[in-house]
Amino acid sequence: MKYTLFLIFIVSGFFSQSQENVDIVQVIDDLTVKWDMTAIKMKNYQGIQEFCLTEDYKTETIELLDNIHHWDTTLYFIVQEKFDTNSDKEVAATLEDIEKLETEYSTENFKDFIVAECDMLKVIEESFDAETVKQYEKDIKKFEKELVKYLNSITYRIDIIDEHIHHLNFD
């Protein structure tokens, strides 16, 4: 038991040291750009169809979200530790936006949403025939609208956190 606690202490110390040497603003910037490009690609029928049918694409997207959440959580603790959260409105807003991203738009919530969307896509495609073209087009529009709304919400949260960090002095 003591050995396990010692190992955890050593590893966490190494982990926190290695993250201190990282430019978190640059990491968040890079992840934001990657997410923005991914979200744009997924915002239409063909993009989500590719996502649903391509295992590598799914895996890359989930890993990207996991990385975003990891670094946003890291940012959260850095901001909490480094800044006065009571007197600085930018700090308070940053923490609030991170909390919202981490709770309402977690990777698990995204997975739940996207599984439902991929299932819906399958139902739409299976129901399509020459006689139901109009309904198919309506279903696709509704599907895309819901998807875009969700992706825009995630993108907004990620982008706003990226914006906040450029207003904070990390020196």
Image (cartoon, rainbow, N blue to C red):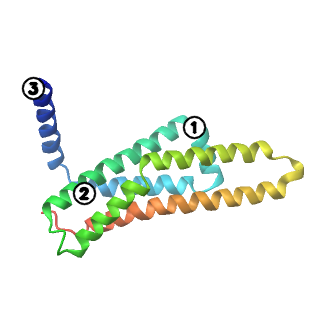
Query: Which of the 4 image quarters holds residue 98?
Result: bottom left
Please, what secondary structure does the residue beneath circle 3 have? helix
> Does residue 21 appear in this view?
no
Residue depth check, mark 3 versus mark 1: number of the one nearer the observer = 3
Disc on res. 2: 3
Residue in front for this viewpoint, 112 or 94: 112
The alpha-carbon separation of the residues under discs 3 and 1 comes to 45 Å
Number of numbered tags placed on the structure image: 3
Residue at position x 54%, y 35% from top? Answer: 55
**Residue 133 location (% of width, % of height):** 84, 54
At 13% from the left edge and 61% from the top edge, which residue is drawn? Answer: 82
Label 1 Cα crowd, 10 Å radius (few <14 / some 14-19 / many 20+): few
**Spot occupied by residue 107 in the image (x, y as percentages of width and height):** 43, 47
Q: Amino acid at mark 2?
A: Tyr
Residue at x 11%, y 33% (from the top left corner): 10
Q: Quadrant of the C terminus?
A: bottom left
Dot label at residue 90? none
Q: CA distance from mark 1 to mark 2?
A: 33 Å
The quadrant where residue 159 appears:
bottom left
> Can the viewer see residue 152 in this picture?
yes
Image point (41%, 52%), residue name: 34
Q: Residue 53: image x %, image y %?
A: 61, 38
Provide the residue designation for mark 1: 54
User: Seen in the image, is 32 located left or right of residue 121?
Assistant: left
Nearest to the eye among marks 2 and 3: give it: 3
Q: Mark 3: which amino acid?
A: Lys
Identify the residue under disc 2: 76
* Image quarter in which the N terminus is found: top left
For the residues labelled 2 and 3, say whether their Cβ atoms are less than 8 Å apart.
no
